[in-house]
Amino acid sequence: MKQKRPILSKAELYTNDIVRKNPPPGDKKIPYSYGRAKRRIFNQLASTIAKSNELPNNAFPNGNIVTKMTLHPSFLAKSYFPDVILKKYKLQSVGSKEVFIKPDVRVGRDQDGDETLSSSLYFVSGQKDNFELLLDAISSDTLDEACREDLIKFEDISFFDGGEKINPSALRDDNQATDLCYEIVLHASNSDKFIVESFYAYISTLDGSVFESKTRTIKGLTFCFIKLSSLKIKSLANFSFIRVVRPIPELNLSDKVELALPDTYMDGCQPNFSVRDNVSNIAIFDAGLGADDCDNANIRYFDLTHQNTDLEENYVHGALVTSAVAFGEADSSNQYAGVVLPVDHFKVYSNQDSFDIGLVDVLDRIVGVLTSKQYKFVNISLGPKVPCPDDEPSLWTSTLDDIASKGDTLIVVAVGNEGIYLNTDMKDLARIQPPSDMLNGLSIGAANSKAKDWSRASYSCIGPGRRPGFVKPDALYFGGESNEKLKILGLSDFQIHEIIGTSFAAPLVTRLAALIDRSTNGELNVATIRALLIHSTGKNSVDRIQCGWGRISHDIEDILYCSKNTVTVIYQGILDSASGVRASVPCPKALTHVGGMVNIDATVCFYTDVDQQHTVSYTRAGLEITFRPDFNNVKKDAAEAATRSLFTKKKIFGTEQSLRRDAHKWETCYKVDDRIRSSGLNEPMFDIKYLTRDEGHSRSASEMRNLQPLSYSLVVTISLEKDFDLYSTILNEYNLLTPIDISLDAIVNV
């Protein structure tokens, strides 16, 4: 019988705190002298104030206007945030986003050429009088030295014009007066009631109406839903604190077409809250279950819509999603087909919700459950039917990212089935749909086959995601194609349904995650399970935009076991200081004498709080990981061992040029690989540094001393191309490493 070697845990015991000395600051190349900056910014600010004077006073709550302040690309580091000049003149950054510009002056080799450069645009609010005071100070040359240093950082200051706020899809070409519903995103937090009330009053002057009960606030953004004549949309956008105006999305229950059912109505299952022995840590949010679908002790059913009569196709969708989690594939290759996982199914959508403004009620039902009960795994195979925007997160994504930020719940989301538009004139519709652009979630697309040769299923939505969160979908899983369909059991009739769709690929990944959790007795945290799933995609050259990190392995044993010459170790660590830790990579001394090449694969994952209003710096935490393959290889005049490129932008994103140099450091999940001679490895180390920011700028010294601990998971696989018992050698030399207690019997004998 082949010996089974479980993956190794407790690698975090081989870490030590790093004491860092900040290097002396280098000479910063300044694009503009103060004299030139003064002339440029004076003219821009004067024009900004003049444009604001053209609009009615009721567009400015309490006399506050919102401007755009764009930094020169040389000043993107969070330490360059111009907080001195903003505080001095009582101005406030209420949001930000990434923009691409051609600055008047370029400095440094990385700015050579004529291409556009990434920069940060800040939305800055304040009393119009305060902007005028700043203008006067510039004109009279009375700025103090600190404010002068901030002024030279600006490339442009301009008025936030209403036309920029309107999503093109919200405009009509027929010039006909039609009352339409719109979603409005305001720069307003819960403490900014006066902004929201002023907005309501402004809408009434345009003879519009607000669905006030649907208004929701997430940190610095408030989402409102209104009804207004299409001819007045441009006047609406003049309200200063509006960030974006866009159409209200429909809800997308993926895969309706493939089910091919008539529009017939039927009664659903009665709610079933029975107490059972197998308490579930899995929540499914979907449409309902049919009348006979709940006759199973492993399925608890909660109807949060209170709409028992519904379309048959909705019930079938809900049943097949739940079957995918509870039973898995109805296929001979499914090794654990007899394993039934207990689930809690929540009906959060009925056909009546087609009329729900902004899909707020559907989202509220999901939020109500997630904020009242702790689930380790959540499956969402529905969401707004709209492509994810680049710089304006949706209400769904903003809300769920906030809930998942603690890292206690793995939210698995289907990316949508509009990938069929990729090679058409409507290719923008092929992009992933909310909330699959979550940074704190796992977005799943569909692969077209389980065979060795596979690709993205033709219907599966593609990336990229936002920045950060560029690699989306995170991964693919088999979801079927017209010539190789996915087989799922019906809950009530136990007949095999041949279907396709990301709606069913996602719950199969949810099931796999739950099986990993059960077979390891709950010892692995959510970040580690997420990292293991991404890690299982292995080395590949797939298109990141279409396939994410690749196709997740369907074999749980491939994920949880090592071989003689391939060893996987897990670090489940906590960072509580910005200096970070130094983590040893298990590399036995005998390895240098074995010769040949060593392959190293690493996947990192963490969860972080987010700033929804600052899309350019959406994640508050990041990791900077440095690989030192030979700890004794210290070059002359160097303080540390030499590094080797591994966790770099190019390794993670490939040749994508539009991303910033440090973009990879703020991603919450990514993987890399390397191939190195065994003789080049001598006490190899990873330096893992904790990065942090708050609303796009640096934290204070006090905040840095009291950082929230950051939990991270790092999965590393070391493999040899020569025959050598690496597994046993590592265990003997690194005796603190512990083989994970894996009990596959626990999932077979449910």
Image (spheres, rainbow, N blue to C red):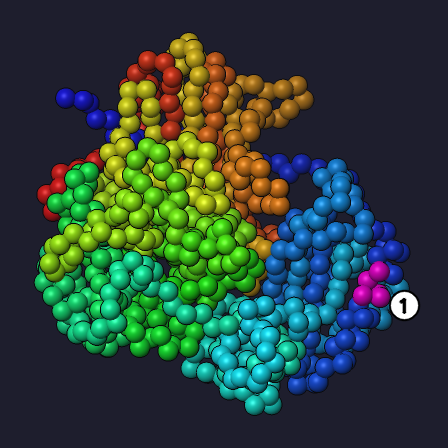
Quadrant of the image containing the N terminus: top left
Left or right: 82 in relation to 396: right
Left or right: 331 in relation to 732: left
What amino acid is at disc 1? Answer: Ser
Looking at the rendering, the stretch of residues picked out in magenta corresponds to 40-44
Residue in view at x 51 percent, y 76 percent: 182
The magenta stretch spans residue 41: yes
Q: How many marks?
A: 1
Q: Nearer the viewer, residue 434 or 195?
A: 434
Residue in view at x 9 percent, y 63 percent: 295
Q: Nearer the viewer, residue 96 or 708?
A: 96
Q: Residues within 10 Å of mark 1 (few under 14, many from 20)?
A: few
Residue linked to disc 1: 140
Identify the secondary structure beneath mark 1.
helix
Q: Is residue 58 above or below residue 42?
A: below
Q: Report x, y in % for residue 553.
A: 31, 38
The magenta stretch spans residue 632: no
Residue in view at x 64 percent, y 38 percent: 22
Q: Quadrant of residue 53?
A: bottom right
Left or right: 270 in relation to 202: left
Q: Report x, y in % for residue 91.
A: 69, 69
Q: Main secondary structure of the magenta part?
A: helix
